[in-house]
Amino acid sequence: MPSFPYETVDVFTDRPFGGNQLAVFTDARGLSDAQMQSLAAEMNYSETTFVLPPDDPAHDARVRIFTRAHEMPFAGHPNVGTAFVLARHGRDRGGVLRFEEIAGLVEVKVARDAAGTVTGATIAAPQALTKSIELPADAIAACAGLSPSDIVVTNHRPVRASVGVFFVLAEVTLEALSRATPDLSRFRAVRDSTPGLEGRFSLFLYARDGASDIRARMFAPISGTWEDPATGSASATVAALLLSLGSQDDASFTLTQGVEMGRPSLLHLTARRGEDGIRATVGGSCAQMFRGEALL
């Protein structure tokens, strides 16, 4: 009976039982697409990754990312956690890993402490910031169980944006953030009435807490994630979006998520203007949790 080893880590935290859980299958050769999807559903984390040999030997791995329900072109905490696991196995090259993914090439810089122990990673999102549709503030408020006045539209209206995978980003008041509660029927109604969402709707709410501190929550109940404790790809998109609203060349932010879930997460974000648009990074620490194998 074939066996497939995996490890789990908590991502965007420096201690167990915080951050966002991730399962990493470190050698997924021999697994079919259907088996990967079934394993991700079985693990029941927001995402599970499967590591395969790269198509280009100049890169380090091809990484496939699955939620409970579908494959993702890119995601933040799965890349940080996968890099953490692989680097602890000595699979990085001089502190760098390059992952081939549907959204493009993801370059990862491994973080180590003074003793040389791997502690986390920082990833560069594979695409520059893109924005598509804006959505009505009252509809987004209803999806989150809030009032339209809780949505802050001074800087931007709720907008669908991406640096590799799309989210709807909406700024809310700091007080309203803790009150947000997803309404599945409203999520479905907005998805079904908005062709520009292309059948998927994940809502990232954020509140400014000073010049560089951000608090956030993410809801994707349609795809099975009622709330996510740390959403690196959406956080990187917010950093890029905020930079796009001003005239600075670069910016950095600290984002806290997962507090309401009892899984506090800390994400470090940067954004910079480049020749091809605004690029973003997201990084943080990881905590090693379990090891096992799937027998299929």
Image (cartoon, rainbow, N blue to C red):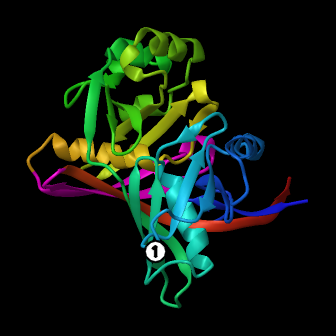
In reply to whether residue 252 is colored magenta, the answer given is: yes
Image location of residue 133, percent across then percent down: 29, 23
Q: Nearer the viewer, residue 281 or 51?
A: 51
Image location of residue 72, percent across then percent down: 52, 42
Which structural element holds mark 1? Answer: strand
Q: Is residue 6 above or below residue 150?
A: below
Around disc 1, counting alpha carbons within 10 Å, would you say few (fewer than 14), some (14 to 19), or many (20 or more)?
many
Name the main secondary structure of what is drawn in magenta.
strand
Q: Is residue 28 above or below residue 208?
A: below
Quarter of the view holding residue 205: top left
- Tell me if 273 is positioned left or right of 67 in this view: left
For label 1, the residue is 110
Q: Residue at x 55, y 57 (%)?
A: 63
Residue extent of the magenta highlight = 248-276
In reply to whether residue 18 is colored magenta, the answer given is: no
- Tell me if 141 is positioned left or right of 53 in this view: left
Quarter of the view holding residue 50: bottom right
Position of the N terminus, as image quadrant, is bottom right
Q: Residue at x 19, y 27 (%)?
A: 154
Q: Look at the image and tell me whether residue 14 can be seen.
A: no
Q: Nearer the viewer, residue 64 or 183?
A: 64
Image location of residue 163, percent across then percent down: 33, 45
Q: Is residue 187 above or below residue 167?
A: above
Q: Residue at x 38, y 45 (%)?
A: 164
Q: Residue at x 46, y 81 (%)?
A: 93
The amino acid at mark 1 is: Val
Residue that protrudes farthest toward the left in the picture: 247
- Tell me if 67 is positioned left or right of 285 in this view: right
Image location of residue 222, percent across then percent down: 59, 24
Q: Nearer the viewer, residue 130 or 15?
A: 130
